[in-house]
Image (cartoon, rainbow, N blue to C red):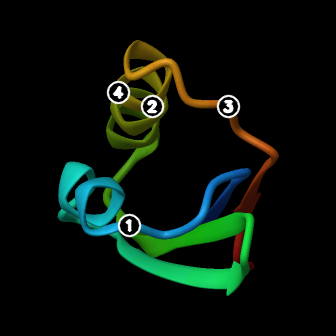
């Protein structure tokens, strides 16, 4: 399991947070939301990234904590 951070160029909203229940959504600026959480493997990460893409959302950055 690894911890990931995904930055999205959107203000945090209840709808955005609810769309990713396995992650914690934190507004780090008025126009950037940080999703953080632990994912079990690359398959789970790819599934999350596909969900983001399917929603038509842009990704600014994906980081894996060491």
- Answer with mark 2 or mark 3, whichever residue precedes in sequence: 2
Residue nearest the observer in this picture, 58 or 63? 58
Residue 4 located left or right of residue 24: right
Residue 51's tag is 4
Which quarter shows the C terminus?
bottom right
Label 4–label 2 contact, CB within 8 A = yes
Q: Residues within 10 Å of mark 2 (few under 14, many from 20)?
A: some
Residue 58's tag is 3
Name the quadrant containing residue 47: top left
Q: Residues within 10 Å of mark 1 (few under 14, many from 20)?
A: few
Label 1–label 2 contact, CB within 8 A = no
Q: CA distance from mark 1 to mark 4?
A: 17 Å
Q: Nearer the viewer, mark 1 or mark 3?
A: 1
Which quarter shows the N terminus?
bottom left
* Image coordinates for residue 14, horizontal then vertical, percent: 26, 68
Residue 13's tag is 1
Q: CA distance from mark 1 to mark 2?
A: 15 Å
* Image coordinates for residue 26, horizontal then vertical, percent: 52, 83
Name the residue at 39% across, 48% down: 41
Query: Label 2's element?
Result: helix
Q: CA distance from mark 2 to mark 3?
A: 8 Å
Name the quadrant containing residue 60: top right
Q: Nearer the viewer, mark 1 or mark 2?
A: 1
Q: Which residue is mark 2?
A: 52
7 relative to 38, above or below: above
Q: CA distance from mark 4 to mark 2?
A: 4 Å
Name the residue at 36% across, 31% down: 43
Name the residue at 18% across, 60% down: 18
- Answer with mark 4 or mark 3, whichever residue precedes in sequence: 4
Q: Nearer the viewer, mark 1 or mark 4?
A: 1
Residue nearest the observer in this picture, 36 or 3? 36
Name the residue at 22% across, 65% down: 22
């Amino acid at each position: 399991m690894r911890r990931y951070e995904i930055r999205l160029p959107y203000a945090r909203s209840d709808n955005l947070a609810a769309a990713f229940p396995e992650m914690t959504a934190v507004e780090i600026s008025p126009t950037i939301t940080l999703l953080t959480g632990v994912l079990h493997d690359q398959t789970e990460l790819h599934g999350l990234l596909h969900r983001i893409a399917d929603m038509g959302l842009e990704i600014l950055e994906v980081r894996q904590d060491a």
